[in-house]
């Protein structure tokens, strides 16, 4: 076993029995449940009847190609967007998440795909951004410094200058900053949307170890990454989106990476076209054989 494999095994062992890793319904209701959520942007149906749930202690990986609707679902669960239809339940109760603040109050903390830091403000302010009212007393400020530094160190094994402007941090440190900000809220559900893409392998594994510790205490996590090795390492369950629709859910151990990649990939053509013997027409367009009602005819397709 390689070190990352050992780490993954440790993370899995640390999970509580209620994680639902075997797919059985645990005694606790899901932390968050999305029911048939739909969202359209103009002509684009970004999400159609998207449903998923995350139980306490569980890591659910949301998989899908670019533009498949992952971040749209994340934004609906984070109160950034409102759904056209469908509902969201938090700990069993139906809620309407009217704003990001409302989602945070419901225990949902999100690290968005875009790294959002206020570059001209100190790291300390960025860690506590939007988390409670500004503090003035020395004691409260000292507590924030100590909690912020401890959370940063737990996650990264490093220390940081809390007084430096966040804009002076490199990209990886800014990513740590927004993850720590989310963790400092002690959420019930942590959503990580491509949050590992800027981390090196060491930091990525440290994040996974921290997630292992926190999920062992009941934290639920919705995890998005294009890297299959990562999702295979930490997810208890996989929910696969394709073109805005959930096309499959698999428990850990039920599917390997290849099957999940197949599931998330669009079929080459969805109109009955057979792609075995394409030819290029003089116009430069590709000609494909199309089989419909067992008749075969030639259909031009734009190259
Ligand atoms: N605010 C918006 N206005 C218009 N179209 C949008 C908006 N947000 C998302 N879309 C469209 O909705 C679809 C789903 O986008 P979304 O960002 O949810 O995909 P994604 O799975 O997160 O992709 P990626 O892997 O690239 O992050 C895409 O076609 C995208 O262009
Ligand atoms: Mg996205």
Image: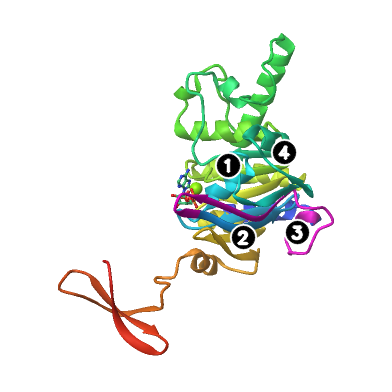
Kindly state the secondary structure of the residue where label 4 is placed: loop
- Drawn side of residue 258 relative to residue 144, left or right: left
Q: CB under 8 Å between callouts 2 and 4?
A: no
Residue neighbourhood size for the residue with mark 4, other residues' Cα within 10 Å, grouped as few (<14), some (14–19), many (≥20): many
Dot 1 and dot 3 residues touching (CB under 8 Å)? no
Determine whether the beta carbon of the residue marked 1 sits less than 8 angstroms from the nearest atom of ligand 1: yes
Q: Residue at x 51, y 58 (%)?
A: 64
Q: How far apart are the alpha carbons under marks 1 and 3? A: 29 Å
Query: In this image, 102 relative to 113: left or right?
Result: right
Question: Does residue 301 appear in the picture of this structure?
Answer: yes
| Residue in front for this viewpoint, 59 or 81 | 81
What residue lies at 63% left-to-right and 49% top-to-bottom? Answer: 222
Residue of label 2 = 238
Task: Please tell me which of labels 3 and 2 falls first in the chain.
Answer: 3
- Residue 81 is marked as 1
Above or below residue 24? Residue 223 is above
Point 49% across, 42% down: residue: 200
State which region is magenta.
18-45
The quadrant where residue 76 appears: top right
**Foreground mark, 2 or 4?**
4
Spatial separation of the CA atoms under disc 3 and disc 4: 20 Å
């Amino acid at each position: 076993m390689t070190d990352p494999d050992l780490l993954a095994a440790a993370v899995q062992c640390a999970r509580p029995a209620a994680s639902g890793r075997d797919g059985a319904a645990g005694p606790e209701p899901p932390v968050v449940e999305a029911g048939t959520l739909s969202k359209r942007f103009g002509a684009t149906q970004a999400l159609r009847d998207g449903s998923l749930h995350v139980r306490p202690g569980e890591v659910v990986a949301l998989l899908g190609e670019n533009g498949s609707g992952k971040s749209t679902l994340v934004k609906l669960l984070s109160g950034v967007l409102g759904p056209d239809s469908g509902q969201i339940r938090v700990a069993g109760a139906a809620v309407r998440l009217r704003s990001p603040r409302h989602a945070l109050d419901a225990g949902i903390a999100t690290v968005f795909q875009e790294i959002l830091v206020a570059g001209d403000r100190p790291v300390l302010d960025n860690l506590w951004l939007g988390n409670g009212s500004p503090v003035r007393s020395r004691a409260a400020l000292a507590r924030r410094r100590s909690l912020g530094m401890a959370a940063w160190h737990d996650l990264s094994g490093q220390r940081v200058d809390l007084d430096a402007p966040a804009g002076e941090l490199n990209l990886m440190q800014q990513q740590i900053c927004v993850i720590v900000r989310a963790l400092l809220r002690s959420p019930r559900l942590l959503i990580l949307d491509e949050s590992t893409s800027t981390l090196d392998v060491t930091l990525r594994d440290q994040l996974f170890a921290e997630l292992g510790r926190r999920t062992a205490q009941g934290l639920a996590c919705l995890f998005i990454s294009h890297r299959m090795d990562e999702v295979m390492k930490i997810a208890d369950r996989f929910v696969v989106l394709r073109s805005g629709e959930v096309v499959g859910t698999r428990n850990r151990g039920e599917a390997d990476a290849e099957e999940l990649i197949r599931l998330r990939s669009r079929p080459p053509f969805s109109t009955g076209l057979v792609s075995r013997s394409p030819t290029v027409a003089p116009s430069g367009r590709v000609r494909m054989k199309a089989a419909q009602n067992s008749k075969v005819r030639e259909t031009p397709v734009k190259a």
